[in-house]
Image (tube, rainbow, N blue to C red):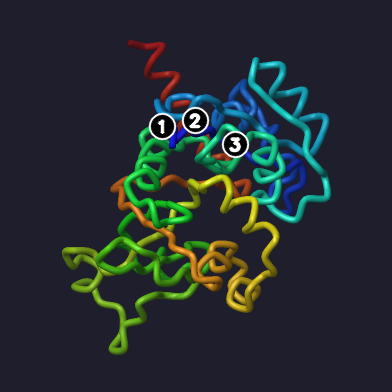
């Protein structure tokens, strides 16, 4: 097998909490451009491509010189959008799904999930996690948690605290080594054939309850390998998230200019 890999960035125009977020450009560049340029820093993929659902995103990506395809605007999820594009890539072995609202994704993280699939031939999917050391973050339903076995195989993902301490959450538990609690990072590498079959499977009951697509993979008995990294990435979901990102970019640009 050649292990040829590509990155596909699903880009949805509508967003309930932050309308048109991928096109926001207070920094002088649309958000989707930051994600695209971050993905280009990965060394293993042969292509980075945006799969969009709206002409404005298509135009924005073309404007900054990115590779982009229009996909079905009625796709149910980003995974379905990625699969739609991957279906026409018969020479590709591994497809990496990078969320469009992850402008600070590390190229090393993308390479990491690709290597995980290469090194674990039985796994259908690879993803990442990072330790949680803060109780507020641990209890936040927006922070998806994951537990995995000593072979790095995912056991479950949840918006609830997992594992759930019977006697309560303590500082000692949060600081324990090796860590007890892990945040799931929403970056996935799929074997292409599996990705195409996954989108044909019915949603599982746990997936519907938690609103977490990855639970479908586990429900039907497929293996997800979890790699651990020390630096989490933070997606842009709310106006506050975006303003923090704008402030960071503005500060970094100012420091660079004043050097």
Q: Measuring 76% from the left and 41% from the top, which residue is drawn there?
A: 13
Residue picked out by circle 1: 107
Instruction: Give x and y (percent) for residue 117.
Output: 40, 47
Question: Badge 1: how crowded within 10 Å, few (<14), some, or many (20+)?
Answer: some
Numbered label tally: 3
Instruction: Give x and y (percent) for residue 256.
Output: 38, 15
Q: Which residue lies furthest to the bottom in this view?
A: 167
Q: Residue 21: tell me if it is visible.
A: no
Question: Badge 3: how crowded within 10 Å, few (<14), some, or many (20+)?
Answer: many
**Circles 2 and 3 in contact, beta carbons < 8 Å:** no
Q: Can you tell which mark lies on residue 39?
A: 2
Residue picked out by circle 3: 8
The quadrant of the image that shows the C terminus is: top left
> Cα distance, mark 1 to mark 3?
14 Å
Viewer-proximal residue among 193 and 66: 193
Instruction: Give x and y (percent) for residue 202.
Output: 69, 69
Q: Which of marks 2 and 3 is nearer the N terminus?
A: 3
Badge nearest the viewer, 1 or 3: 3
Task: Name the side, left or right, on which 130 lies relative to 56.
Answer: left
Q: Measuring 35% from the left and 47% from the top, which residue is drawn there?
A: 116
Q: Does residue 59 lie above or below 205 as drawn?
A: above
Q: Residue 102: tell me if it is visible.
A: yes
Instruction: Give x and y (percent) for residue 14.
Output: 77, 46
Viewer-proximal residue among 251 and 73: 73
> Cα distance, mark 1 to mark 2?
6 Å
> Cα distance, mark 2 to mark 3?
9 Å
Q: Measuring 42% from the left and 56% from the top, which residue is drawn there?
A: 123
**Circles 1 and 2 in contact, beta carbons < 8 Å:** yes
Q: Earlier in the sequence, mark 1 or mark 2?
A: 2
């Amino acid at each position: 097998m050649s292990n040829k890999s590509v990155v596909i960035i699903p880009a949805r125009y509508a967003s309930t909490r932050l309308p048109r977020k991928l096109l926001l450009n207070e920094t002088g560049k649309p958000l989707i451009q930051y994600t695209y340029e971050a993905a280009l820093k990965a060394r293993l993929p042969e292509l980075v491509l945006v799969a969009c659902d709206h002409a404005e995103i298509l135009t924005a990506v073309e404007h900054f010189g990115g590779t982009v395809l229009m996909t079905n605007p009625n796709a149910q999820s980003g995974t379905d959008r990625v699969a739609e594009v991957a279906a026409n890539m018969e020479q590709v072995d591994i497809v990496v799904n990078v969320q469009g609202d992850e402008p600070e994704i590390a190229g090393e993280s993308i390479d990491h999930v690709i290597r995980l699939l290469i090194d674990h031939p039985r796994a259908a999917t690879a993803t990442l996690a990072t330790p949680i050391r803060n109780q507020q973050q641990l209890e936040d339903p927006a922070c998806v948690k994951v537990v995995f076995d000593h072979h790095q195989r995912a056991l479950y993902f949840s918006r609830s605290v997992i594992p759930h301490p019977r006697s309560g959450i303590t500082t000692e538990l949060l600081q324990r080594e090796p860590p007890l609690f892990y945040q799931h990072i929403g970056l996935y590498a799929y074997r292409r054939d599996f990705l195409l079959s996954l989108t044909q499977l019915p949603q599982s009951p746990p997936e519907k309850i938690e609103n977490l697509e990855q639970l479908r993979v586990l429900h039907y008995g497929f293996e997800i390998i979890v790699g651990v990294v020390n630096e989490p990435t933070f997606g842009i979901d709310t106006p506050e998230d975006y303003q923090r990102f704008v402030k960071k970019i503005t500060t970094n640009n100012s420091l660079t200019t004043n050097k």
